[in-house]
Image (spheres, grey):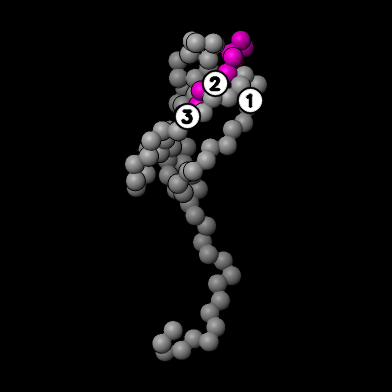
Amino acid sequence: PVGGATGYTLSYEPINATEPRKPKEMRVGPTVNDVQLTDLFPNTEYAVTVQAALHDLASEPVTAREVTLPLPKPRDLRLRDVTHST
């Protein structure tokens, strides 16, 4: 947290997504240390930008890049009654 900040603006957008997405933005209070990003694509790099706010003023943005995890492999797959047509 930044001393004196009245809140933060956080935005995130995919960098290498297979389909274009608009940046998402959220505002959080000055004491928030954790946020959950939603509607993320698996195995995709995102740019996450945070700015501190003091009423109507905003700090310089800080941007980090992170990659989401890939989808997990199917588990416990079982085949039964296999025939030549199934």
In the picture shown, does residue 42 fall above or below 85? Answer: above
Q: Which mark is residue 25?
A: 3
State how far apart marks 3 and 1 are (Cα): 15 Å
* Residue 80 on image: x %, y %: 55, 83
Query: At x 59% / y 14%, what residue is drawn?
Result: 6
Q: Secondary structure at mark 1?
A: loop
Q: Amino acid at mark 2?
A: Tyr
Q: Amino acid at mark 3?
A: Glu
Instruction: List the residue tagged with mark 2.
Output: 8
**Is the Cβ of the residue at disc 2 closer than 8 Å to that at disc 1?**
yes
Describe residue 41's horizontal placement relative to residue 37 as left or right.
Answer: left
Q: Can residue 43 be seen in the rendering of this structure?
A: yes
Describe residue 18's horizontal placement relative to residue 77 as left or right.
Answer: left
Of marks 2 and 1, which one's residue comes earlier in the chain?
2
Let me know if residue 3 is in the magenta part.
yes
Q: Secondary structure at mark 2?
A: strand
State how far apart marks 3 and 2 are (Cα): 10 Å
Q: Which mark is residue 45?
A: none
Q: Which span is picked out in magenta?
A: 1-11
* Residue 76 on image: x %, y %: 59, 70
Q: Answer with the quarter of the image where residue 63 lies.
A: top left
Which one is closest to the eye, mark 3 or mark 1? 3
* Residue 29 on image: x %, y %: 61, 21
Q: Residues within 10 Å of mark 1 (few under 14, many from 20)?
A: few
The quadrant the C terminus occupies is: bottom left
* Residue 8 on image: x %, y %: 54, 21
Instruction: List the residue tagged with mark 1.
Output: 32
Q: Secondary structure at mark 3?
A: strand
In the picture shown, does residue 2 fall above or below 44? Answer: above
**Is the Cβ of the residue at disc 3 closer than 8 Å to that at disc 1?**
no
